[in-house]
């Protein structure tokens, strides 16, 4: 999934990879079918030459539709829709809870009360018999 800047925000687009021509190494086309704010169609063609120079062509509305039909025959494949990662895993997370609060490594670990107090109501037999 690519992004196009439209109406003051980044909008998710469909991304197509196109057969490179005229000395370009990579061509990519981002297509926004409809902007949620203004309702316009936007297409952006990004080409990278072999000496790492980037050129961008951007069209909107009716010109975008004509440009898309012109480039439709050159499409090699569409980029797969990757799932949106909502949150990153924190490396400082200990992964357990105490009194309904999640503890982190940055917390004061000496104040943890897990396993510190014994349960007086728990009845443990004097002799445990283990059969082997």
Image: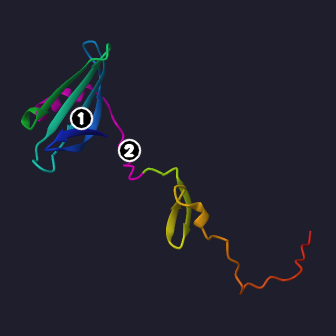
Q: Position of residue 67 (x, y in %)?
A: 14, 29
Residue 122 point in image, percent of width and height: 73, 84
- Which residue is outermost to the left? 62
Q: Which mark is residue 30?
A: 1
Please name whichever residue, 65 or 100, is drawn nearer the observer in this view of the structure.
Answer: 100
Q: Of 26 and 75, which appears nearest the observer?
A: 26
Element class at badge 2: loop
Q: Is residue 87 left or right of residue 22?
A: right
* Quarter of the figure with the N terminus: top left
Q: Residue at x 59, y 61 (%)?
A: 109
SS for callout 1: strand
Badge 2 vs badge 1, beta-carbon distance below 8 Å: no
Gap between marks 2 and 1 measured at Cα: 15 Å
**Taking 121 as reference, is 105 above or below it?**
above
Residues 5 and 122: in front is 122
- Answer few, some or many: residues within 10 Å of disc 1's Cα (few below 14, many 20 plus, some between 14 and 19): many
Characterize the local packing of mark 2: few (<14), some (14-19) or many (20 or more) Cα atoms within 10 angstroms.
few
Which residue is drawn at the image coordinates 11% and 47% (left, top)?
39
Residue 79's x, y, as percent? 34, 36
Where the C terminus falls, by quadrant?
bottom right
Locate residue 122 relative to residue 71 in the image: left or right: right
Q: Is residue 70 above or below residue 132?
A: above
* Residue range corresponding to the magenta coloring: 64-87
Q: Which mark is residue 118?
A: none
- Disc tally is 2
Q: Residue at x 7, y 36 (%)?
A: 62
Please tell me in which quadrant of the rendered image residue 80 appears.
top left
Could you tell which of marks 2 and 1 lies nearer the N-terminus?
1
Please tell me which residue is depicted at 28% across the width and 36% down the height of the picture: 15
From this view, report whether residue 23 is shown above or below residue 126.
Answer: above
Q: Which residue is mark 2?
A: 82
């Amino acid at each position: 999934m690519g992004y196009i800047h439209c109406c003051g925000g980044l909008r998710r687009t469909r991304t197509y990879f196109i057969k490179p021509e005229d000395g370009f190494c990579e061509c990519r086309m981002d297509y926004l079918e409809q902007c949620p704010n203004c309702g316009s169609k936007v297409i952006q063609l990004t080409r990278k030459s072999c000496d790492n120079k980037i050129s961008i062509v951007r069209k909107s509305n009716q010109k975008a539709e004509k440009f898309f039909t012109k480039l439709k025959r050159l499409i090699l494949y569409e980029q797969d829709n990757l799932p949106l990662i909502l949150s990153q895993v924190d490396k400082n997370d200990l992964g357990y809870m105490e009194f309904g609060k999640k503890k982190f490594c940055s917390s004061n670990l000496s104040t943890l009360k897990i396993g510190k107090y014994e349960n007086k109501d728990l009845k443990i037999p004097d002799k445990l018999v283990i059969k082997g």
